[in-house]
Image: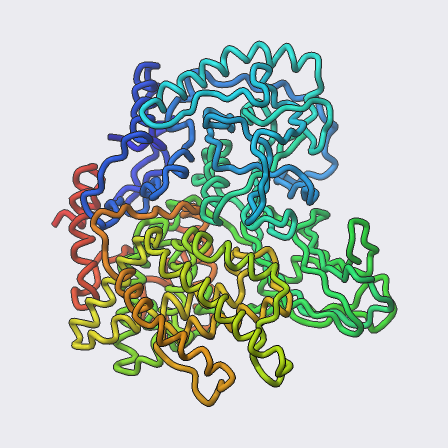
Amino acid sequence: MESPRQSSQTQPAAPPLPTSYRWHTGGGGEKGTSGFRWGRFVGWGRALSHQEPMISSQPAPRLLFRRVLSAPPKESRTSRLRLSRTLWGRHKHPPQEPELEPEAPDPEPEPHVPQIPEAPTPDVPVWDIGGFTLLDGRLVLLGGEEEGPRRPRVGSASSEGSMQVAMGNLRDADRTLGKAEPEAAGSNQVHNVRGLLKRLKEKKKARSELGANTSRDGTMGSKESLATLSELDLGAEREVRVWPLHPSLLGEPYCFQVTWVGGSRCFSCRSGAERDRWIEDLRRHFQPSQDNVEREETWLSVWVHEAKGLPRAAGPSGVRAELWLDGALLARTAPRAGPGQLFWAERFHFEALPPARRLSLRLRGGGSAGADLGRVTLNLEELSAPRAPAAGLERWFPLLGQPAGAALRARIRARRLRVLPSERYKELAEFLTFHYARLCGALEPALPAQAKEELAAAMVRVLQATGRAQVLVTDLGTAELARCGGREALLFRENTLATKAIDEYMKLVAQDYLQKTLGEVVQHLCASTEDCEVDPSKCPASELPQHQSRLRSSCEEVFETIIHSYDWFPSELGTVFSSWREACKARGSEALGPRLVCASLFLRLLCPALLAPSLFGLAPEHPAPGPARTLTLIAKVIQNLANRAPFGEKEAYMGFMNTFLEDHGPAMQHFLDQVAMVDVNAAPSGYQGSSDLALQLAVLHAQLCTIFAELDQTTRDSLEPLPTILRAIEEGQPVPVSVPMRLPSPQVHSSWQSYSAKWRRFARSRKHCPASWNH
């Protein structure tokens, strides 16, 4: 059975590459009949209503270096996020493109590049993307009830169907508030969606007639027509663009914006992975040749530290620092008030931005019309390597428009990334897949901590796109166990490539888990004004008992949410933890198994999420000092509970919590055992984030080129043919060497053997197996 993505695109057959296996960048199938397309559509509906039972807890085998859909998630909500190109072929009935009005000639000969759109206002309607699906260029609302724009927040009681918004070109004359459609669920899913399509056709004429009498202005906040959003026909718009939004713009952690000529809409997602998947699917729908063309993107990291020398106070609302790129607002810091210097210590990171020229950091007073308190304008060309240091340019920047002495301290790192067609990175992907252990062993002693973090993240994202990240993390964790020997106190506490890779992998596959487990309780604690300080040097003695009681109650609440989170714990992590415990047992150190799980899950994920919730998408900004201290104390207690380590003399003021540790120790141990057991009936949660393999390989290539430029000759020679591959890609020449496709030895980890056997069987069944694998 051919891939839906292949069959949906009609391209000339590419000449075979002179390599050992074939890369797939598009299908060349012929146009199918309407009956064939409808049969595929019925199959899609059946898949939604009757999911196939899982035969094994292992992820479904996938062909290397071929972009495929993720495994089905546990919840049915995400299963609706499918492109209509997998259901209907747009090649039979292509939409009529609107006639473009003649434009004045561009005075500059530079080619047109997408520009960052104007940032939405904080009060713009935000739609929950979970209720939508993409059908033939239309974002269509599925389900039985009318929905209005809403902002899902903890404790909020937004009334779905009661809110209205002007949609301009979004018309649905037949549906009114309070009139519910039949619920599209269960075995009626196919018939309901078929009925939906029929209604869309029937309403096409009504929309056209209505559109003739009303403006098609889709700007935000238009009051020309009030209607709930039931259909957004993007196929009829020009220059459709999709952009992620920083949480500081709308106060939502995972939002994206769809823009077109004359309008835009904002949507919220429940996780960063879900947002990345929607953005990629929408972009691929309107730019289907993305993997086969060369493109340039901008990556930007900005650390806003502090400001000094401001001549006047900004009032009780405080001062914010705003980031602007070529005249478009990207993000803003939290407000800071008070005399003297203002401290933010906030980091902003942006990926896949269009080519840009100027970055501006602006200080503004609080409020809707804050006064301009100075700005810093920088040329990105001067901030990019090799002109700027690899770690970024950090200094006190004078504030324009302010007296001498007023300055902003920031660190800025910019990179112009050239992304080549995906097949150009074939040999690099092969080398990483089959020789990552040799790569990590050779580079480990030569890299600083930041370079290790960036390289590990790039490797995990590349292998996640090819379906091999789980094996990578399993093997690196086992190697870390061997490196530390019996010194369990060192497990995952050092800045190694293994610990950084495990950090990145857990962030990728556990975003939904974190949000569901800690999201509500963390937001409640961030909004609380109750003081939980228990250090006698910082708290009056008369209030100490009350503060201790509050802290214990808060720890109880957090602990209960964690130990009851097993039902939605990511099965991918459970498989990794189970493999680690088996490795400990094989080494005769079975007691280290729970310690290994604890050191990764609590030390590297759950407790850091409590300490810095904004970095994990649990809060829009860093908590105020009071809640931040409460979260710090709770994280201390939970970490000690996981480590089975009572508080001692070093933190004697926390000694009253030792009874809490004793009471909940057995429950914690049971939870650690639970998450390290593989449930054969559990489906993989299915990472739903971006799988733009060409982009991830371009990032990896750029990082390796930077690393190899400063590497000694002996180490470079030991990693051949990788230096030759990197040089050929950089120079745009064919790679003159082949990569030996040998799997690591069985001593590294037994999962390699079982995985490779499954992959060979799957590849042969699809008749795309590399020739070297058939021997």
Q: In this rendering, is residue 359 above or below 101?
A: below
On the image, the x and y values in percent for residue 594 come to 28, 71
On the image, the x and y values in percent for residue 423 come to 37, 45
Residue depicted at x 12% and y 50%: 775
Q: In this rendering, is residue 476 above or below 93?
A: below
In this view, the residue in front, 366 or 17, is 366
On the image, the x and y values in percent for residue 345 come to 64, 68
Specify whether residue 727 is in view. yes
Q: Is residue 254 left or right of residue 763?
A: right
Specify whether residue 736 is in view. no
Q: Is residue 358 left or right of residue 515?
A: right
- Quarter of the image for residue 157 reads top right
- Quarter of the image for residue 643 reads bottom left
Q: Is residue 53 left or right of residue 266?
A: left
In this view, the residue in front, 78 or 751, is 78
Residue depicted at x 29% and y 27%: 46
Residue depicted at x 44% and y 52%: 516
On the image, the x and y values in percent for residue 153 come to 56, 47
Residue depicted at x 42% and y 24%: 183
Instruction: Please identify the quadrant where the N terminus is shown.
Output: top left
